[in-house]
Amino acid sequence: MKQEKILITGALGFVGKHLAKLALAKGCEVHGIELKVPQGVSTNGVKIHKCDLCDGKAVNKTIRKINPARIFHLAAQSSVSLSWKEAKKTFEVNIKGQLNLFDAVLSSKTNPVIVIACSADEYGNPGKKNIPVKETTPLAPVSPYAISKTVQDLLAYEYNLRHGLKTVRIRAFTHTGPGRGEIFAESSFAKQIALIEAGRQEPTIKTGNLNAIRDFTDVRDFVSAYWAASEKCKYGDVYNICSGKGYRIRAVLAALLSMSKRKIRIEKDRDRLRPSDIPVLIGDNTKFIKQTGWKPKIGITETLKDLLNYHREKQRAGKQGAK
């Protein structure tokens, strides 16, 4: 039986690695697009293609070569804080990269399902009356990153209407777990705890805003949701993926600290504060659950434990490598 070809842009990123693992377990032939890798590398069973999404000709060539049945477009400049410092780069990577991908698909005369990783940040500060946030809540992005994601979202809708592309728009709320980038709050906390336990940092954790409330989903649940979206969602439509539960960042930090035997102080770091921050962002996943039957299975305590152990393992590996 011929294997189904899957393409993941950003296949070596946080979510990409987990999604690739899931696709391989389902028996798919998994391809990935990355910018900074040697051509033709195979990583953990994923065939990696070196390609700059901002280079239209390169994207055209790669899509024709792979001819995927499904595309999961995850590659992006995904940091809100970095987007204020590098707004132009954020717009170019996120918007131009997606346009090149869409145009390459059209040029190739194929019609794969394309799941687009949009963001809950598109909703901006929805206000208490709009919590939990539904897909019908007005969009009001407040950062360059959120603006770029809003454009990606609307372009996916427009390309479905005008060209018939099988796009599915996912407004992703916060997702975390082992492998989460250290630039994000909960992973930064976990890394700092691991460093303190390893004797590589003073027993003080530096933090930004601890009062924000976010909707956390485990990344392993999240990629199963992406898969369900590619199979069961309506083309051109938009869906929230989230747990539907809000957690204050202060409580997330407290949970991580409770998993360590070390006595650790907390210190606010002004450099970690954002120019604008959304106080509460909790999603309504009713539409997605009704469409796909998906439900999150992994609780936040298990997620945070696995995240902390991931950073502990990295510290142990680093220590052994230094010998």
Image (tube, rainbow, N blue to C red):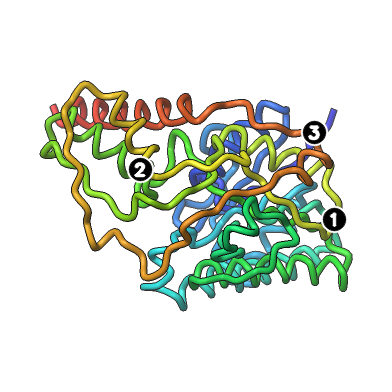
Say which of 106 and 86 sits in front: 86
Q: Position of residue 262 (x, y in %)?
A: 18, 25
In primary-sequence order, the first of circles 2 and 1 is 1
The answer to the question of whether label 3 and label 2 lie on touching residues, with beta carbons closer than 8 A, is no
Residue at 76%, 47% (x, y): give it: 70
Label 1 packing within 10 angstroms: few (<14), some (14-19), many (20+): many
* Residue 41 visible: no
Q: Residue furthest bottom?
A: 88
Q: Residue 135's image quarter?
A: bottom right
In primary-sequence order, the first of circles 3 and 2 is 2
Q: Residue 242's image quarter?
A: top right
- Measure how far apart labels 3 and 2 are at the Cα level: 32 Å
Q: Position of residue 187 (x, y in %)?
A: 37, 41
Q: Which residue is mark 1?
A: 235
The quarter of the picture where the N terminus appears is top right
Vertical comparison of 12 with 139: above or below: above
